[in-house]
């Protein structure tokens, strides 16, 4: 009998103790990347999918056949629009409200997902915010809001998603980090700490979940043309473009294709970061 995944007792449990023998069904198979809809029959949750990169990821996974849960916190109308786009293209999706910064709210959301679908295959932790200030001006509120929404949120979602993936016997967790988590960035001490934290979390979860056919990877975008980018003042945008070897920002679809890669093709990849950044960061 193999050791339980998470030991019972000795403090709060992350999830129910599960053994490989009892939890990996014979039917747990990876998608066939040569199939036109390799994620058909799979359920995917994308946090912060009402706009920007998240909405592109939702459309990309739906185009690959997944039924996608489009999570949002404020943008109900925008999320409904993303669902409508997916359905118009012949895919399946459903909008679900849930504040990733709030453990109880996420518990409720995954409870509804479990009740409705009874399974989960792919979790994309994408939701994020900015509260950029130089370190000297950064308040504790700026710090806590970003750490909670961008980093603790990943734990909140994994807390409820991982037991469902374990039940499934197969799963993909893809965390959206940033090149800023790899190299730091002026005015983003809170954001870079959160994004670096995601990378450490990704690697550790990857080690712990590999034996259950669950891979955990990160995508590290460079600057991407979304509301987040548009909030950057024009003079700063110019300076940023000068630092990017490709001299342009990414389209959200270019990030979404990286997420699809991990979900569909990256069977033997776990604990990795995929840098989609136009060359702004080329570290190992
Ligand atoms: N844009 C870039 O240049 C860039 C670069 C590297 C990494 N990233 C990362 O990529 C991810 C997406 O960024 P983006 O540019 O697409 O951002 P965005 O356009 O500002 O969209 C953010 C999304 O996150 C959602 N969200 C925010 N707080 C939330 C919460 N507490 N609970 C649930 N959802 C929440 C928003 O939902 P509502 O509409 O409901 O508020 C929205 O759907 C973020 O993690 C970001 O850090 C972005």
Image (tube, rainbow, N blue to C red):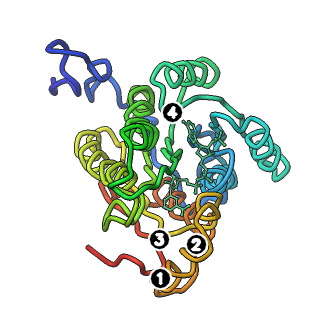
Q: Residue, x 38% and y 49% (percent of image)?
A: 138
- Say which label, 1 or 2, has the lower sequence index: 1
Q: Are marks 3 and 2 in contact (CB under 8 Å)?
A: yes
The number of discs equals 4
User: What residue is rendered at 76% in x and 43% in y?
Assistant: 78
Disc 1 vs disc 3: which is toward the camera?
1
The quadrant of the image that shows the N terminus is: top left
Distance between the alpha carbons at the discs numbered 3 and 4: 24 Å
Nearer to the camera, 237 or 106: 237
The residue carrying mark 2 is 250
- Ranked by sequence position, the earlier of labels 3 and 2 is 2
Residue 276's label in the rendered image is 3
Return the x and y of residue 255 as percentages of the image width and height. 55, 64
Q: Quadrant of the C terminus?
A: bottom left
Q: Quadrant of residue 69?
A: top right
Q: Residue 126: image x %, image y %?
A: 51, 48
Residue bearing mark 4:
100
**Mark 1: few/some/many CA within 10 Å (<14, 14-19, 20+):** some
Mark 4 / mark 1, whichever is N-terminal: 4
Gap between marks 4 and 1 measured at Cα: 31 Å
| Residue underneath mark 1 | 244
Provide the secondary structure element on which disc 2 rests.
loop
């Amino acid at each position: 009998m193999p050791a339980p995944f998470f030991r019972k007792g000795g403090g709060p449990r992350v999830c129910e103790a599960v053994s490989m023998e009892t939890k990996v069904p014979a039917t747990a198979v990876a998608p066939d990347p040569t199939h036109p809809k390799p994620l058909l029959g799979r359920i995917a949750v994308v946090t912060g999918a009402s706009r920007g990169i998240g909405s592109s990821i939702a459309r990309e996974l739906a185009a690959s056949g997944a039924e996608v849960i489009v999570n949002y916190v404020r943008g109900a109308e925008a999320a409904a629009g993303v669902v409508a786009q997916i359905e118009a293209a012949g895919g399946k999706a459903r909008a679900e409200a849930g504040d990733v910064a709030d453990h109880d709210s996420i518990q409720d959301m995954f409870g509804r997902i479990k009740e409705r679908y009874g399974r989960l295959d792919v979790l994309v932790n994408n939701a994020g915010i900015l509260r950029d200030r130089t370190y000297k001006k950064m308040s504790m509120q700026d710090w806590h809001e970003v750490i909670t929404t961008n980093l603790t949120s990943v734990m909140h979602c994994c807390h409820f998603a991982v037991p469902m993936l374990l039940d499934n016997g197969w799963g993909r967790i893809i965390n959206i980090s940033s090149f800023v988590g790899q190299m730091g960035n002026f005015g983003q001490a809170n954001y870079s700490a959160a994004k670096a934290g995601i990378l450490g979390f990704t690697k550790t979860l990857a080690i712990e979940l590999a034996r259950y056919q669950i891979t955990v990877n990160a995508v590290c975008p460079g600057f991407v043309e979304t509301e987040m980018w548009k909030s950057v003042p024009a003079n700063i945008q110019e300076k940023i473009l000068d630092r990017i070897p490709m001299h342009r920002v990414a389209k959200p679809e270019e990030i979404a294709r990286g997420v699809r890669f991990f979900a569909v093709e990256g069977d033997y990849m776990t604990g990795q970061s995929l840098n989609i950044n136009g060359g702004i960061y080329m570290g190992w």
